[in-house]
Amino acid sequence: MITPRMAIYAYLSADPDIQNLVGTRIYHQTVPQNPIFPLIVLNTISSTDERDLQGRAWSETRIQITAMADTLRKAETIIFTVRAKLEGYKGMMAGVLEVLDIETITYNPTYQDDVGLTHYHLDVLVKHK
């Protein structure tokens, strides 16, 4: 089974604009030890099934995408590029997930004093079959 997080990972990993910003540094849930910045981390926040009279009609999965960089400008550039790639997406994502729509829920930066990095979080809602 391919999850929305896995489909977004494959989709972003294959995009040349994203590759120019973070290379292959896109991770699931956690960052490896001694990472190179900037990078992206993907986390699934929640999933729900929407039903009709026939049963499950579609699912909605909330994904948090976090850009980590040494400056706010870099983190913003990454997260707004990701948002532009995902917002309003419809169709087969990465050839494996039928996406009905992707919409932005929230986006906000936080400065992490302890590590001297900006984390820019983007939450998207993926409606999918």
Image (tube, helix red, strand yellow):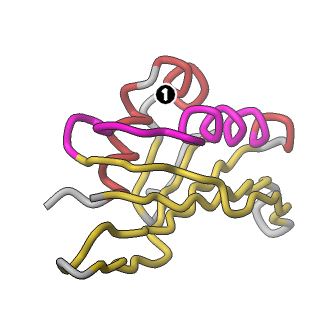
Queried whether the magenta region covers residue 66, the answer comes back as no
Q: Which residues are magenta?
A: 75-96
Tell me residue 15's x, y (percent): 44, 24
> In the image shown, does 99 or 123 lie closer to the viewer?
99
Image coordinates of residue 94 in percent, x first then y, are 28, 36
In this picture, residue 52 sits left or right of residue 63: left
Side (left or right) of 89 relative to 98: right
Q: Residue furthest front?
A: 53
User: Is 76 drawn above or below residue 47 in the view shown?
Assistant: above
Image location (x, y in percent) of residue 65: 57, 55
Task: In the rendered view, tell whether residue 43 sits above or below residue 87.
Answer: below
Q: Which residue in the protein does label 1 denote? A: 23
User: Number of labelled discs?
Assistant: 1
At 50% from the left and 63% from the top, the residue drawn is 63
Residue drawn at 46 percent across, 64 percent down? 30
* Quarter of image, res 129: bottom left
- Percent from the top left, x then y, of residue 77? 75, 33
Q: Is residue 109 above or below residue 114?
A: above
